[in-house]
Amino acid sequence: MHVEPHSDGFDKIMIDGQSFKEGKTSLKISASDKDVLIISEPFEVRRYGGYYARIKARTDSPKAPQIELRMITFKDQGKITNRFKHKASLNDDWSLISTSAGFLRPGVNFGRVFIHIPPFSEGSIWLDDAGCWEVHGFRID
């Protein structure tokens, strides 16, 4: 997982053992004047696979921004082949944010999941139980 911004002085992202949906921790992002982008490690995808990406999120911010969950697929050389996304508004209850991906273009080789959080001025956002799975295989003629 990669997190942007990743400079040594950016202390707005931390593991939280007090608020979580699954397991015993979540990722807490405190209010910041910077965009936060969390990027998964690359994972192999198949052209005829169907994929499901999800994350659970909540906030205590009275003016939380919409967060965006993206799945982007690439060719070997890094050229983008497909983009899938879903934006969601949050509240103080855990919400499921998900997107599905399929009918991938020829030459696709790998994918990544991105979570984009725009700047916000007060409170925090918590993320938990994130993942991406191949859930369907399309029949090849």
Image: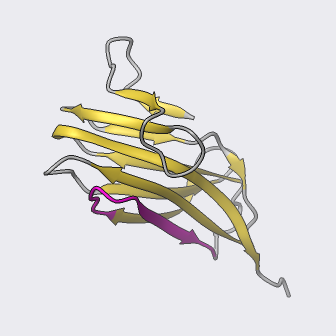
**Residue found 46% across the figure and 39% down from its top:** 38
The image quadrant of residue 66 is bottom left
Indicate the quadrant where residue 118 lies: top left
Q: Is residue 87 above or below residue 12?
A: below
Q: State the residue in front, 115 or 102.
A: 115
Q: How is the image coloured?
A: secondary structure
Magenta residue check for 1: no
Residue at left offset 44%, top offset 46%: 127
Image-based side of 89 in relation to 53, left or right: left
Percent across and percent down for residue 22 are: 57, 50
Side of 111 relative to 3 (left or right): right
Magenta stretch encompasses residue 89: yes
- Going 40% across and 53% down the picture, which residue do you hit? 57
In the rendered image, residue 96, in percent from the top left (x then y), is placed at: 45, 64
Q: Residue furthest top?
A: 8
Answer left or right for 6 relative to 135.
left
Who is closer to the viewer here, 119 or 125?
A: 125
- Residue 34 point in image, percent of width and height: 24, 32
Name the spot of residue 21 as percent of width and height, x first. 50, 52
**105 lies left or right of 6:** right
Query: What range is drawn magenta here?
Result: 88-102
**Res 138 → quadrant:** bottom right
Residue name at image x 51 percent, y 41 percent: 39
Q: Quadrant of the N terminus?
A: top right
View extreme (bottom): residue: 141
